[in-house]
Structure formats: C-alpha cells, structure tokens
Amino acid sequence: MNAQAQAAAPARNFPIGAPILEVKNISLRFRGVKAITDTSFNVLQHEIRAIIGPNGAGKSSLLNCINGIYKPQEGTIAFKGKVMDKLSPNIVAQFGISRTFQNLALFKRMSVLDNILVGRKLHMNANFLSVALQLPEAMQEERENRQKCEEIVEFLEISDIRDTPVGKLPYGLQKKVELGRALATDAEVLLLDAPMAGMNVEEKRDMCRFILKVNDELGTTMVLIEHDMGVVMDISDNVVVLDYGKVIGDGPPDEVRNNQDVIDAYLGVAHD
C-alpha cells in the first residue's frame, strides 16, 4: 500500500456497534443530470443492507460512489470513520470494500479456482521476476493464496467444479463463482449489485442461503441491490429505498413495506 493509501487507511480498531459505512448527503451529476441527490444512510457492522428502487433510481450509481468508480460532487462517504475522499477502486478494495457487478465479469476460459484466485491479487506482494524465478518467498505466497481460495471453494460447496472452465457453468453457478472471487479479497464490506438478477427460483434460494452464510459465519457486512421484494424482505436487516436518486424510505423491511411513499413509487400496492 502506497504512502497516500496508508495515510487514508481506516483505523483497525473500530468500535463495535458503530456504523461501518456512512453515506452523508451524496449528490452525483452527469453533465447536469442528477443521478443522486442529497442521499444519506448508514450501514452497521455485520448487517445486510438492501438498496431498492425503480429502474433508473440511482442504485448502481450509489454503489459506484462507494467503491470509488464515481466521485460525487457533494457529500462524503466514510468507512470505519475515515472519509474515503477521491480514492481509486483499487485503494478502496485494499481498505476492505469489494464489489460485484450486475453483469458477470469472469474469465470464461479459466477454471473456477483460477477465477477466485484473481481476487487474491490485492494480497500478492511478489513481483513478476521473483515468480518467474520461483523464489521461495514467491512460492510460499502462492501456496498461501491458493489454500485460501481452496477454502472458499469448499465454503461455497463448489469443490466438484473447481477445475471446470467458468464458461461451461450455468448462470447461477457463475454468479456463485463471482461471489467467491469477492470473498477472496477478504473484504469487510461486500457491495453486491443485483446478485440474483436473471436467476430462477431455485438459484435465488441457493444464493440467498450463501449470502446469509457469508454474513453469519464470516461476519461480512453486505450492501446489496435487489429487485425481488420477497428476497429483500427475507434476508435484509434494513432497507433504503431510492426514487429519482433520493431516499424515500429507510428502515427495517416491515417498516419500508408499509411506507406509503414506497408503495406509491415502487411496490405499487400494499400487501396485508
């Protein structure tokens, strides 16, 4: 980690129960068009926070602000109490915030295990020459990173396809591999952009199980965009609702479900 990154790095000793991620009054514009307007919410350690809203509400743009792809014109984003100001996605990932995307970005000809190994790049210190010469330090680092990825493969219950090229797998399994690659970064916060988009009912059920498993057993905090309201209500601790880039609801699932502004803008009708 370079000197700039070290100076900006969040403190390791973080108070239990404090918000791990704080979004304060974020506004984002593209050539005068407002994508996000004065948006604020907090994410607590170990919670699953869902972001919902109609298409074009600014959900993916918000995740892009959190992980450094976009730079908001106003507002701040703090991770573990430290403002993440104008940092690249690579530095944000080094701090402990990783991201998956709605469209798969896997290497289709590479195996499941090798795709997950890509997530360990942040933890690789050996340079090209030391790897090429197979120096002991480089070989030890490679063994440790491979062992970490083998553990992730086992955790996700995909050992039987570890050597299969990703392009030969069904869509649901490819999404699980993408989750595995994000886990390989050792992130404290995972940003999941529509992790169940395009899945059938069985695949969604399986992905929900593993999202909860990652949250429960690894203690990973999650912020996810999801369009299936049944999924949101089942697995989320809290929900923030966006409409035209503004927050119109924020709270536990039952509270959001009964929020009239949310009903009018997104859910359509109230359910008993």
Image: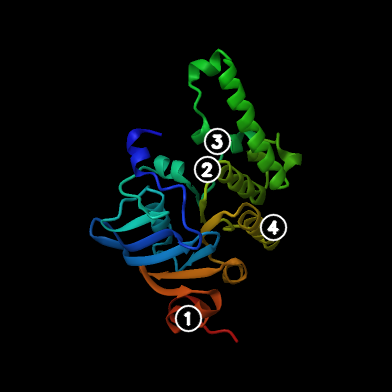
Residue type at mark 1: give it.
Ile
Residue type at mark 4: give it.
Asp
**Residue drawn at (51%, 80%) of the image:** 255
Q: Quadrant of the N terminus?
A: top left
Residue type at mark 2: give it.
Ala
Q: Earlier in the sequence, mark 3 or mark 1?
A: 3
Q: Which mark is residue 199?
A: none
Foreground of the two, 142 or 197: 142
Pinpoint residue 129: horizontal percent, then vertical percent: 49, 15
Gap in angstroms between the C-alphas marked 4 and 3: 25 Å
Q: Quadrant of the C terminus?
A: bottom right
Residue that extends furthest to the bottom in the rendered view of this protein: 272
Residue that extends furthest to the right in the rendered view of this protein: 160
SS for callout 3:
helix
Q: Rate crowding at label 4 as few (under 14), some (14 to 19) or many (20 or more) other CA atoms within 10 Å.
A: some
Q: Rate crowding at label 3 as few (under 14), some (14 to 19) or many (20 or more) other CA atoms within 10 Å.
A: many
Q: Which image quadrant is residue 229 in?
A: bottom right
Pinpoint residue 195: horizontal percent, then vertical percent: 56, 55
Tag 4 and tag 2, C-beta contact below 8 Å: no
Q: Rate crowding at label 1 as few (under 14), some (14 to 19) or many (20 or more) other CA atoms within 10 Å.
A: some
- Residue holding disc 2: 105
**Residue drawn at (39%, 62%) of the image:** 58
Gap in angstroms between the C-alphas marked 4 and 2: 21 Å
Q: Is residue 34 above or below residue 186?
A: below
Gap in angstroms between the C-alphas marked 1 and 4: 28 Å
Pinpoint residue 4: horizontal percent, then vertical percent: 32, 37
